[in-house]
């Protein structure tokens, strides 16, 4: 399989996981009044590290892929993040939101054909 | 639009505009940075590792970080349901830059797909107001 596509997929996945870690880290436990203490505990620190790895993967992806091709794929996280948020945190998805997510996904599939 | 204490919509829009310009510039600079290397080079090579220290990559990443900060401050003043869809203006600028600077092929299919994505983001943004 094409290594640029693998790098792109990993970049998107790591970005999604870091969002979930940020959400978990900023809302659980005692963050102190301002939440600044939460920035230094494992979920947020891990999330930031994953973001750095995601950035490296992204750079490796765009080394060979066209920017106008790779960039729209980042919006797959409009699908992945809410899906994982539902599975892991039990967040609810309204009908309208599901519709929007489906439309975004169709758009990404169309770009993938280009 | 909510008008809670401390919200300044005009400042929010300015910050969002700056965020879009800075983020687009960051992406184009990073692409230019990665184009410095011969594409036939194996991905896990010393050349790639050194590339990450080049001024274009370091500068592009710094710009990217500044864009994220601008975004966070913009969110203090704008509703997410407005900032989110407006943020997709980035796609238009990225496409223009990719065509102008890198001669990328902007097929009708690619433009159509991206327009569909923007439409989806607008629907998602509209769903935020109904559920909160």
Image (cartoon, rainbow, N blue to C red):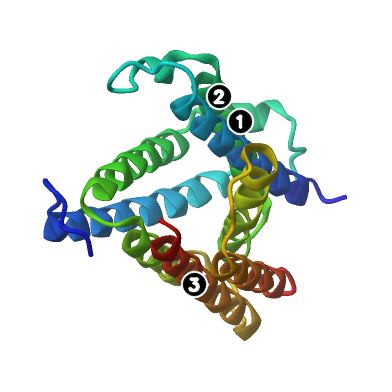
- What residue is at 67 percent from the left and 38 percent from the top? A88
User: Could you tell me which chain the residue with mark 3 belongs to?
Assistant: B
Q: Is residue B126 left or right of residue B107?
A: left
Disc 2 secondary structure class: helix
User: Could you tell me which chain the residue with mark 2 belongs to?
Assistant: A
The residue carrying mark 2 is A49
The span from disc 2 to disc 3 (Cα, nearest Å) is 31 Å
Tell me if I can see residue A107 in this picture: yes
Are the two marked residues, 2 and 1, in contact with CB atoms closer than 8 angstroms?
A: yes
The span from disc 2 to disc 1 (Cα, nearest Å) is 6 Å
Are the two marked residues, 2 and 3, in contact with CB atoms closer than 8 angstroms?
A: no
How would you rate the neighbour count of disc 1 (Cα within 10 Å): few for under 14, some for 14-19, many for 20 or more? some
Question: Residue A53 occupies which quadrant of the picture?
Answer: top right
Disc 1 secondary structure class: helix
Q: Position of residue A73 (x, y in %)?
A: 63, 59
The residue carrying mark 3 is B123
A64 shown above or below A17:
below
The residue carrying mark 1 is A53
Tell me if I can see residue B39 in this picture: no
Q: Is residue B125 left or right of residue B106?
A: left
How would you rate the neighbour count of disc 2 (Cα within 10 Å): few for under 14, some for 14-19, many for 20 or more? some
Question: Residue B78 occupies which quadrant of the picture?
Answer: bottom left
A7 shown above or below A21:
below
Disc 3 secondary structure class: helix
> Which is more foreground, mark 2 or mark 1?
2
The residue lying toward the viewer, choosing from A72 and B116, is B116
User: Could you tell me which chain the residue with mark 1 belongs to?
Assistant: A
Q: Residue furthest bottom?
A: B108
- What residue is at 32 percent from the left and 51 percent from the top? B22
- What residue is at 82 percent from the left and 51 percent from the top? A2
């Amino acid at each position: 399989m094409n290594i640029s596509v693998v790098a792109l997929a990993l970049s998107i996945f790591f970005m999604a996981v870091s969002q979930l870690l940020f959400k978990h880290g900023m809302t659980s436990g005692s963050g102190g009044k301002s939440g600044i203490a939460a920035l230094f505990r494992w979920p947020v620190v891990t999330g930031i590290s994953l973001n750095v790895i995601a950035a490296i993967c992204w750079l490796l992806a765009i080394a060979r892929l066209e920017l106008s091709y790779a960039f729209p794929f980042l919006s797959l996280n409009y699908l992945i993040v809410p899906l994982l948020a539902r599975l892991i945190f039990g967040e609810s998805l309204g009908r309208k939101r599901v519709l929007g997510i489906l439309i975004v996904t169709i758009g990404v599939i169309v770009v993938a054909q280009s | 639009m909510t008008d809670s204490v401390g919200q300044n919509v005009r400042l929010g829009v300015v910050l969002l505009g700056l965020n879009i310009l800075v983020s687009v510039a960051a992406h184009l600079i990073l692409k230019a940075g990665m184009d410095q290397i011969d594409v036939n080079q194996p991905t896990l090579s010393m050349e790639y590792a050194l590339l990450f220290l080049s001024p274009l990559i370091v500068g592009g990443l710094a710009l990217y970080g500044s864009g994220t900060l601008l975004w966070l401050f913009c969110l203090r003043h704008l509703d997410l349901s407005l900032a989110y869809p407006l943020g997709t203006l980035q796609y238009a600028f990225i496409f223009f830059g990719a065509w102008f600077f890198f001669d990328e092929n902007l097929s009708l299919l690619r433009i159509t797909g991206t327009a569909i994505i923007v439409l989806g983001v607008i629907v998602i943004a509209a769903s935020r107001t109904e559920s909160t």
